[in-house]
Image (cartoon, rainbow, N blue to C red):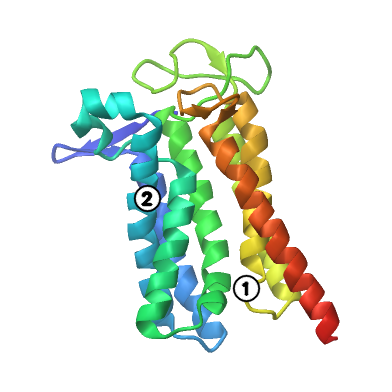
Amino acid sequence: MYNDLFTVFGLTIHGYGLMIGIGTAIAMFWAPARAKKRGLSDDVALSMLLWALLFGWSCSKILYIITDWQTFLSSPRSVLGGEGFVVYGGIIGGVLGVWLCAKRYKAPFLEYVDVLLPTVSLAQAFGRVGCFMAGCCYGKACESPLSVVFPEGSFAPAGIPVLPTQLFSAAADLLLTAALLWVDRRSSKPGKLMPVYFMLYSVGRFLIEYIRDDPRGNVGSLSTSQFIAIPLFLVGLLWYRLSYTHTINEG
């Protein structure tokens, strides 16, 4: 939970950025290897991942600005920096980036999505560990064996026991990665991982939002992420049902 890890030649290495960097690096090595194993282009897989990162970063920042518009108006530079993202914006933007890249290279979109998704969910787990180190995305104040106390300088309130929702999210992302790999090994149908990702991620995020306590915008009684989770889950469910029915009919 210490974001400033060490300083080298005047450059401070932050835990948040380091964890995101590690997760991204793993994805950049793993995605091309998964593509090559399936007879797909490793170069195209890497390009798609880079497009996903670019569009995902942009859309997650845009959605953060929308959910915290007043802060953006009062201090645009602080919001446009390296802090402040909404994961759902990254998911939507990432899918858009992969789709556009598939169009660019005339590559099979769904097959490459199956390649990329496990690597992305694993990278998300590392990102959540980075959130823990920075203290952002913190949980509600709670006296429990699982609670942690953040020091001064963190985004979380200092000296108050809070639930480590960042670590809960990281664990959920690891379980999601395992589930995606399990489904991937048991089905050769292109595109089978995206509806599973949509459904499982949405359920996990919807539940964790109940015990988060950081300012993150809301739509009525729901947080912004809970509001987005509902239609995303329904899209995944409908996609899964249609795909499953189509497979049975073909059989």
Q: Quick one: label 2 or label 1, which is nearer the N terminus?
A: 2
> Which residue is rendered at x = 63% and y = 78% of the image?
190
- Which residue type does callout 2 highlight? Cys
> Which residue is rendered at x = 73% and y = 76% of the image?
187
Secondary-structure class at tag 2: helix
Left or right, 35 with respect to 67, comes to right
Say which residue label 1 marks.
191
> Which one is in front, 182 or 250?
250
As drawn, the residue found furthest toward the left would be 9
Question: Quick check: can you spot residue 130?
Answer: yes
Label 2 CA crowd tier, 10 Å (few <14, some 14–19, many 20+): many
> Which residue is rendered at x = 66% and y = 42% of the image?
204
Question: Quick check: can you spot residue 21?
Answer: no
Say which residue label 2 marks.
59
> Which one is in front, 121 or 245?
245
> Which residue is rendered at x = 44% and y = 71% of the image?
99
- Which residue type does callout 1 highlight? Gly
Give how far apart the Cα atoms at labels 2 and 1 are. Answer: 23 Å
Q: Position of residue 48 (x, y in %)?
A: 40, 71
Secondary-structure class at tag 1: loop
Q: Position of residue 5 (x, y in %)?
A: 33, 34
Q: Which mark is residue 114?
A: none
> Which one is in front, 100 or 7?
100
Q: Is residue 226 above or below residue 49?
A: above
Q: Quadrant of residue 65?
A: top left
Figure quadrant of the C terminus: bottom right
Q: Is residue 167 above or below residue 59?
A: above
Q: Is residue 9 above or below residue 199?
A: above
Figure quadrant of the N terminus: top left
Q: Position of residue 115 (x, y in %)?
A: 54, 73
Q: Is residue 228 above or below residue 178?
A: above
